[in-house]
Amino acid sequence: MIRNIRPFLSHFRMFAVPLCFACSATATNIAAASTASQVTLLEISLNPTIGNFVFIRISPVPALASCANNGYWQYSLNLSTSSMANQEYAALLAAQMAGKTVTISGTGTCNDFYNVESANALNVQS
């Protein structure tokens, strides 16, 4: 049983502020991820000389992650990461062929390609 809790509490307060600061920094990074709602696919490109990436150009262009300063492509999709990426690519092609609008969520980072925001999720509208 703790007889004097004051030293314990003062020790806890010393660590509480840095922990809260780390949480707010993480929330800021998450908030920087973009969402392009009901946009038109203008162009989808594969270029094997660059890597196993799909580059996506849409209209209208949303506010993208700060690293996404390519000026032409808005999102990238890394086909090497999972089978889900290949399914998303198939859905992009089907949406473009059918003239459907899509919603694309970004990661807020440019991990796949240095100046194009990485795509995180895809929804094809009917």
Image (tube, rainbow, N blue to C red):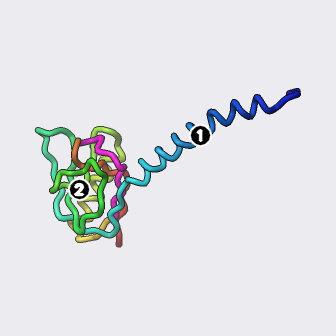
Residue found farthest to the left: 49
Would you say the magenta stretch is mainly helix, strand or loop?
loop
Q: Give the range drawn in magenta.
A: 103-113
Lateral position of residue 107 relative to residue 113, left or right: right
Give the x, y percent position of residue 39: 28, 68
Q: Which residue is drawn at 35% across and 57% down?
A: 34
Q: Which residue is drawn at 38% across and 53% down?
A: 32
Tell me the CA gap for discs 1 and 2: 37 Å
Circle 1 sits in a helix, a strand or a loop, which is it? helix
Lateral position of residue 17 relative to residue 49, left or right: right
Query: Where 96 falls versus 114 (above or below)?
Result: below
Q: Quadrant of residue 110?
A: top left
Give the x, y percent position of residue 49: 11, 38
Which amino acid type corresponds to the residue marked 1 in the rendered image? Val
Residue 38 counted in the magenta span: no
Quadrant showing the C terminus: bottom left
Residue placed most toward the observer, 21 or 121: 21
Q: Name the residue under label 1.
A: 17
* Disc number for residue 80: none
Mark 1 against mark 2, which lies toward the viewer? 1
Q: How crowded is mark 1: few (under 14 residues within 10 Å), some or many (20 or more)?
A: few
